[in-house]
Amino acid sequence: MNIKTNKFKVPAESIVDLSQWPTQVEDLYKSKKKYKKFLKKQIEALSAQQQLQYADNSHSLLLIFQAMDAAGKDGVIKHVMSGVNPQGCQVFSFKHPSAKELDHDFLWRTTQCLPERGRIGIFNRSYYEEVLIVRVHPEILHNQKLPDCLLKDDAIWPKRYKSIVDLEGHLHRNGTRVIKFFLHLSEDEQRQRFIDRIDQPEKNWKFTIDDINEREHWDEYMKAYEACLTATSTEHAPWYVIPADDKKNARLIVSQIILDAYEDMDMKYPETSEERRQELLAIREGLVSDE
């Protein structure tokens, strides 16, 4: 399987029109059996790379997932990262901010959760909510205890984009690789997935009336995503627009993008000094003599 991931990457300084980005591509697998085989191979490779990252202990990896409801973020995270050692990976899901979080700047709550060196951090939604849902529902800004002058500032969104880009640049300069995924779901596919959640009792818990309320703002969300991707996709922290109408395709593409990122990192296992090697050999000799 050869997945050319660059075609899903948003070039820096490009203007994004999501109507020109597909939500469906030709299947990357010929059968369900082939899909499982490909994904298993990807998962094993990710596990090996994560072990190397943990041992190298100089790089961290931050994966950010954003999407409309029912696009499959949870499934991608569950399947793609299933082989990763839990000790080296943490997943954070950001919902409505708490009172304490509202007492800080909009980046504060997520920066508390950034991955340590040698580890993977996954944000299931992120600080990007502050330029997506908050932009679609600007009334949320009034609950963020901002000075009146900022609430009246027409440049509040470009300024927030700049804060985000500055943060991601800072992270990159300090060894954190940031990769951002927008799971691009069609409106028709979302409708069908909502119907499936209603028709299948075991999936009822996934569906709320809020999902329908947000669906009514589809066009506004697409404009917010276009502006966001345009302003914040950079060389060191790129956005990838992942066709998400087929969940299996999306998982294979995401896993390959992460593997490609690992290949670009200069990682190696710690070298053992000659002194340490002699010490280990002496310990081994003692263990053998105990038999």
Image: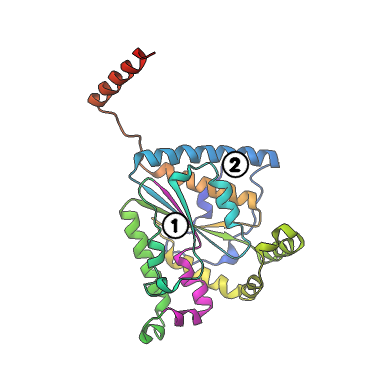
Which is more foreground, mark 1 or mark 2?
2
The spot of residue 170 in percent (x, y) is: 32, 59
Label 2: element kind: helix
Q: Is residue 201 left or right of residue 135?
A: right
Q: Earlier in the sequence, mark 1 or mark 2?
A: 2
The spot of residue 263 in percent (x, y) is: 43, 41
The C terminus - image quarter:
top left
Residue under the point 59% across and 38% down = 40
Label 1: element kind: loop
The segment highlighted magenta reads 119-144
Q: CA distance from mark 1 to mark 2?
A: 23 Å
The spot of residue 258 in percent (x, y) is: 48, 47
Question: Hey, what amino acid is under mark 1?
Answer: Pro
Q: Is residue 175 left or right of residue 69?
A: left
13 or 163: which is nearer to us?
Answer: 163
- In the rendered view, tell whether residue 3 sits above or below residue 162: above
- What residue is disc 2 on? 39
The spot of residue 76 in percent (x, y) is: 58, 52
Task: Answer few, some or many: residues within 10 Å of disc 2's Cα (few below 14, many 20 plus, some between 14 and 19).
Answer: many
Residue 73 in magenta stretch: no
Question: Hey, what amino acid is under mark 2?
Answer: Leu
Q: Is residue 148 left or right of residue 85?
A: left
The N terminus - image quarter:
top right
Q: Is residue 59 left or right of residue 41?
A: left
- What residue is disc 1 on? 238
